């Protein structure tokens, strides 16, 4: 089933058109990867899926983006949308507070006050991010004392804590070592049964390892969008082929 439908979307930063006539269906319980050279619009499309671009002055967007067939720019409040569609950024960005408070923060802002309920959410979220055992004895310690890979998994746990339906990840492992990267890839594959996941990655091996569908972007357009296996083994477009075989440029 399509969780997100993108229909004829164009996005402008002032005069500059960053996305050109994008059409894409993103399926539930799948991992969709966006690949392509720097500046081609991957992050712009990712961020527009939870209206992060609303915060940037001069952005114009037309076309439609639907979440469960509801227009996210017309018929959903942005804060409700961002609860349903969570985001994890390239650089781990834990809040300067304890590990516990990082995860409890979102649920608290959504009105959950009961300590036992918060304890449960924190434990479940950290378990889902495969780091409960690593941190259960240091929940009161600062999140800034964690390693980069642990901080990124904490940010994923923080995204889980408000029980989203979609998780957007913008190059979540680009600052991490191979072991932390592998842990996060395993985690994403493990959780996709409960979520819809969209990931921007510069790492084509990563896209082939974990994603079901891949979109190849170039100059603000989606050149090709297909099953990952097909796109990497039998691309239909010459530009896709050049890019994935390293002959681009
Ligand atoms: N806030 C902004 N104001 C103006 N132009 C922007 C803004 N953000 C992005 N752009 C431009 O839009 C284009 C697409 O940027 P975007 O960040 O989506 O690319 P990307 O494919 O994610 O690149 P990268 O892989 O380097 O992160 C680029 O030309 C970029 O310079």
Image (cartoon, helix red, strand yellow):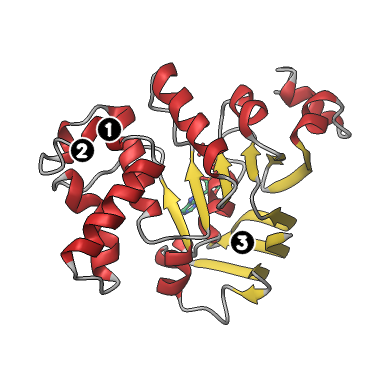
Circles 3 and 1, Cβ within 8 Å, touching? The answer is: no
Horizontal and vertical percent position of residue 11: 61, 61
Query: Which residue is depicted at the point 23% across and 67% down?
Result: 108
Instruction: Identify the residue shown where x is 28% and y is 43%.
Output: 93
Tell whether label 1 touches label 2 (CB within 8 Å): yes
Distance in Å between CA atoms under marks 2 and 3? 44 Å
| Pick the front one: 205 or 2 | 2
Q: For the residues carrying marks 2 and 3, which lies nearer the camera in this image? A: 2
Residue 92 visible in the snapshot: no
Name which of mark 3 and mark 1 comes first in the sequence: 3
What is the number of the mark on residue 136? 2
Which SS class for mark 2? Answer: loop
Q: Is residue 58 left or right of residue 119?
A: right
Question: 10 Å neighbourhood of mark 2: few (<14), some, or many (≥20)?
Answer: some
Residue 133 is tagged as 1
Helix, strand or loop status at disc 3: strand
Q: Secondary structure at mark 1?
A: helix
Which residue bears the numbered disc 3?
11
């Amino acid at each position: 089933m399509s969780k997100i439908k993108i229909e004829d979307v164009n996005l402008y930063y002032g005069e500059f058109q960053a996305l050109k006539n994008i059409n894409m269906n993103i399926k539930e319980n799948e991992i969709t990867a966006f690949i392509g050279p720097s500046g081609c619009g991957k992050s712009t499309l990712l961020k527009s899926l939870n209206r992060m671009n609303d915060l940037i002055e001069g952005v114009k967007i037309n076309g439609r983006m639907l979440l469960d067939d509801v227009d996210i720019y017309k018929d959903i409040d942005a804060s409700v949308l961002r609860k349903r569609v969570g985001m994890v950024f390239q650089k781990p960005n834990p809040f300067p507070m304890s590990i516990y408070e990082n995860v409890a923060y979102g649920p608290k802002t959504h009105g959950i006050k009961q300590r036992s309920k918060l304890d449960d959410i924190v434990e479940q979220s950290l378990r889902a991010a495969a780091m409960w055992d690593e941190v259960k004895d240091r929940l009161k310690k600062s999140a800034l004392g964690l390693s980069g890979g642990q901080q990124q998994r904490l940010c994923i746990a923080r995204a889980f804590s408000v029980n989203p339906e979609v998780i957007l990840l913008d190059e979540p492992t680009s600052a991490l070592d191979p072991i932390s990267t592998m842990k996060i890839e395993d985690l994403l594959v493990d959780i996709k049964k409960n979520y819809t996941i969209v990931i921007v990655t510069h790492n084509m091996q990563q896209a082939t390892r974990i994603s079901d569908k891949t979109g190849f972007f170039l100059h603000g357009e989606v050149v090709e969008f297909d099953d990952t296996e097909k796109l990497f083994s039998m691309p239909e477009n010459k530009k896709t082929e050049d890019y994935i075989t390293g002959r681009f440029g």
